[in-house]
Image (cartoon, grey):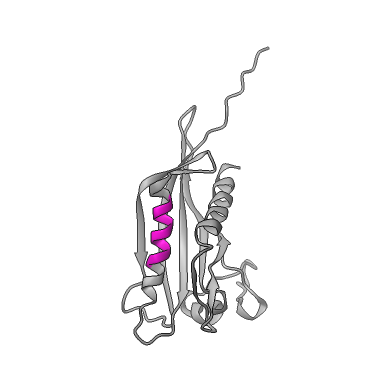
Amino acid sequence: MIPLALQDALVKELGTILKPLKLKNRDGELSHINIYSQYLPVSDSSSSMDGKTGDMAFDFQGINDKYESLLPFVVVYLQDGVIQTGAMAHSMSAGFAIGVYDNDGSRQGYRDVMLVISKITERFEKNDILANKFIAQFPVEWSLQEPDDITCPCFYGSMVLDFATPTYRRECIHA
């Protein structure tokens, strides 16, 4: 399935381009950036079950308490897509949710978020092809959390990158 192949390729690529980068974790130690696919993992102590559906509910209000141990992280998620007909390329949007930890009182953790956004953007500006089949489309959209959204010592941002993707080859049916 093409969307999942894109997501898997992005997770692998981010593992490569962000590997040299180390940021502080909640213990104050430099740590590699954790890369997750679609969702942050949940543990028994950090999950809340929705009684109606049995699905895990993501509580943005309690994100610091529940997910602080996972920082720093990037979640690569499939956002949306358009499936064209015939030989036209499909298009998909991949999102990147970025979280970092910085307990310094100067509240400069947003700089680490921007560094991650810059590394990802730089990679696709230099070479817009991923895994020999996906083509990054510009512009890139990014955002940081609102300045009055106090989540210190955790800082968050996101970015969205669109990709043109391959289509399936038409089968020739001869009777």
Residue, x 43% and y 56% (percent of image)? 120
- Region of the chain picked out in magenta, as a range: 114-123
- Left or right, 168 with respect to 127, comes to right
Question: As displayed, is residue 167 above or below residue 172?
Answer: below
Which quarter of the rendered picture does the N terminus lie within?
Answer: top right
User: What number of labels is visible?
Assistant: 0
The location of residue 14, given as percent across then percent down, is 52, 57
**Residue at the extreme front:** 20
Residue, x 41% and y 71% (percent of image)? 112
Which quarter of the rendered picture does the C terminus lie within?
Answer: top right
**Residue at the extreme top:** 175
Which residue occupies the foreground of this view, 48 or 148? 148
Question: As displayed, is residue 62 above or below residue 5?
Answer: below
Q: Main secondary structure of the magenta part?
A: helix
- Left or right, 54 with respect to 148, comes to right
The location of residue 131, given as percent across then percent down, is 54, 43
**Residue at the extreme left:** 147
Which residue occupies the foreground of this view, 74 or 123? 123
The location of residue 73, given as percent across then percent down, is 52, 68
Residue 81 belongs to magenta span: no
**Residue at the extreme bottom:** 105
Which residue occupies the foreground of this view, 145 or 117? 117
Question: As displayed, is residue 74 above or below residue 164?
Answer: below
Question: As displayed, is residue 155 above or below residue 10?
Answer: below
Residue, x 42% and y 59% (percent of image)? 119
The location of residue 134, given as percent across then percent down, is 49, 41
Residue, x 47% and y 71% (percent of image)? 99
